[in-house]
Amino acid sequence: MPLFRVIVYSIFTSLLLALSAPVLAAEVTRLYQDNCAVCHNAQRLGGMGPALLPGNLKRLRKKAAVDVISNGRIATQMPAFADKLTPADIEALVEFIYTPSSETIAWNLSEINDSHIIHNREQDLSKKPVFEVEDLLNLFLVVELGDHHVTLLDGDRLEPIHRFKSRFALHGGPKYSNSGRFVYFASRDGWISKYDIYNLKLVAEIRAGINTRNLAVSGDGRYVMVANYLPHSLVLLDAKDLKPIKIYNVADQNGKTSRISAVYAAPPRNSFIAALKDIREVWEISYEDDPPLNFAGWVHDYNPESGEKPEIEPFPVRRIKVDDYLDDFFFDQEYVSIIGASREGKGQVVDMDLGRVIVPDLALPGMPHLGSGITWDYQGRTVLATPNLKTGKVSVIDMESWETIKQIETLGPGFFMRSHENTPYAWVDVFFGPNKDVMHIIDKRSLEIVKTLRPAPGKTAAHVEFTRDGKYALLSIWDPDGAVIVYDAATLEEIKRIPMSKPSGKYNVYNKITRSEGTSH
Ligand code: DHE
C-alpha cells in the first residue's frame, strides 16, 4: 500500500476509534463540568437550564436528549454541541444525566431561602388592573408548554390580553388567590412563582424542591403547600411573599421516606391533604390557627378537669393509614371522602372524618388520572367520571354506593375530562395513540358519546375549560404550531382559533375559585 494511503487509512481508523471509544467515567464528569454545569448546576440540580437528574428527565426520551444536546433547543438558551463534542461524548453525557447522582442532594431550608426572589412587593403594587375587561373573574390563563409562556385571555372577548414568560415546564393547575388577582405556578423543577394578574408582574419566586409535583393554596389564602418528589418533602410557604414557614420531611414512623404524589387544599376542613407514593398513608395538615384538639389524636392528652391543652405544634399532621399507595386522588364536593388510585389501578375511598378507608376495592381499571375527574348529578345521584391513562374507557361511578354505573368506551386512553354546571355535555380527550387528535363529547344525561370532533387532524386535541357562564368551551391543540379553539358549548360549533405554542391547560378564574364541579380544584 502506498505510504499516502497508509497515512489516510490510519487517520481515518483512529478517528473512527476516537468517535466510538467509550468515554470513561472521569472523562464524562469533566465533559459535564466543562460544558453543562454553568447552566444546569455542578450537581445537575438545574440553574438557568433545567435539572438534569433521572427523575426530572422522565418525560424526555434518551434519543430526544441526544438531539437536544447535538442541535440545541429552539426558544431556549440551550446551544448546539454537535460541532464541539463527538457523538460518543454526547451519548456518554446522555447516559450520565440519566444515571442517579452519587452525591447526597440537599434542598433544605437554607437552599430554599437562598433561592427566594422578591420581584415586587405587594404593597407597592396597584389594586387596580392595568387593563380593562368586562369581567375580571372571566379571565383565563393558558399555559403554553411550547416556549414556556403563559397567556392571559379575556373570557368575554375571547382575545389574549398579555403573554409572559414562565419558568421551564410548568405542570399541574396554577392556583388562584380567593379574589382571583394573584396566581401561583409550580414548575417541574420546583420553582414556585406568584404572579399579580392585575399588574401583569411577578411578585415573588422560590425554588421549593428539585422535582416538584404540584402546589395548593389554603382556603383562607394565607398559605401555599408544595409537594415534592425530590427531596421527599412538603414545603409550607407564606402566600404573601412565598417565604418558607415549615418543611415536612415526609416519612413513616419507621423512618421510611416517601415521594408526595400530590397535595390539594380542602377549604371546608381548613387543611391540606397529601397523597404519598411510597408509604401507605394519607396526610392531612391543618392550617387553622387553633387546630381542633382531636386533629392528631391529642385529645388523649387533653385534661378536661384542668382544662389544660397539650402543646400543639402549628400546622400539625394527621396520618391516615390506607390499604395501598396513592398516586393521585379526587375529593367529593363536600371534602369528606377522597377517592384515591394506585398506579396499578386499584381504587379506594377514604372517609376523612372517620379517618379510615371505607371502600378498599373501587373498580377503577386502567389508571385513572383522578385529578381530572369531574362530578355531576345523574338521575338524582352524584356521579364521578374519570378518564383512564391506560385504557380507552371513562369510568362513571355512583358516589353513594361506589358502584361503577358505566364504562364508556372511547377511541383510546385519555387525560382530561371537563364540563360545567350550565352544559349537558362533558368533554374528554383521547391523549394517546392513533386517535390522539379526537375529542369526545359525552351527554351527561344519557352517558353516551354524542359527538366526536377531530379539530386538527394528526395533532393532539386535549384539555377543555369553560368560560364562567359555560357558554364556550376552549380546547387545546397541543402542538408547537397549536391553538386554543373556542367552541359554542351548546351547538358544539367552532367559533374561532387563537394561535398558541403547544397550549396545555387553561384555567378560568371564576370556575376555579368557586370550585365548579366540572373542573379540577
Ligand atoms: Fe399531569 C395535573 C400528575 C403527566 C399535564 N398531573 C396533574 C396533577 C397531578 C398530575 C397529580 C394535579 C396537580 C394540580 O393540578 O395541582 N401528570 C401527573 C402524573 O403522574 C403524570 C401521569 C406523569 C408525570 O410525569 O407527572 C402526569 N401531566 C402529565 C403530562 O405528561 C402532561 C400531559 C404534560 C405536562 O405538562 O407534563 C400533564 N397535568 C397536566 C395538566 C394538569 C395536570 C395540564 C392540570 C390540569 C387541570 O386542568 O387542572
Image (tube, rainbow, N blue to C red):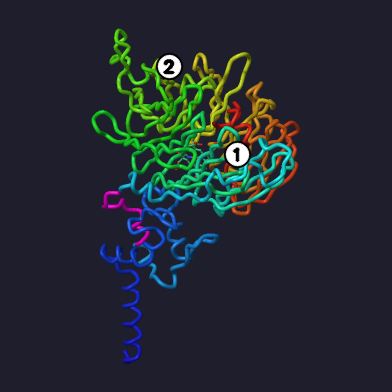
Query: What is the C-alpha distance between the residues marked 1 and 2?
Result: 33 Å
Picture quarter with the N terminus: bottom left
Give 198 or 424, whichever is nearer the viewer.
Answer: 198
Q: Which residues are magenta?
A: 93-105
Picture quarter with the C terminus: top right
- Rendered residue at 57%/20% (across/down): 383
| Type of secondary structure dominating the magenta stretch | loop
Q: Is label 1 or label 2 in front?
A: 1
> Residue 443, position in %: x, y?
66, 26
Q: Quadrant of residue 469?
A: top right
Pointer 1 and pointer 2: residues touching (CB < 8 Å)? no
Q: List the single residue furthest toward the top.
A: 305
Using the image, determine if residue 346 lies above or below residue 401. Answer: below
Q: Which residue is mark 2?
A: 353
- Answer with mark 1 or mark 2, whichever residue precedes in sequence: 1
Give 240 or 212, whichever is nearer the viewer.
Answer: 240
Is residue 479 magenta-colored? no
> Residue 302, position in %: x, y?
30, 14
What SS does tag 1 mark?
loop
- Rendered residue at 26%/64% (across/down): 26
Identified by mark 2, the residue type is: Asp
Q: Is residue 152 left or right of residue 239?
A: right
What SS does tag 2 mark?
loop
Q: Which residue is mark 1?
A: 181
Q: Residues within 10 Å of mark 2 (few under 14, many from 20)?
A: few
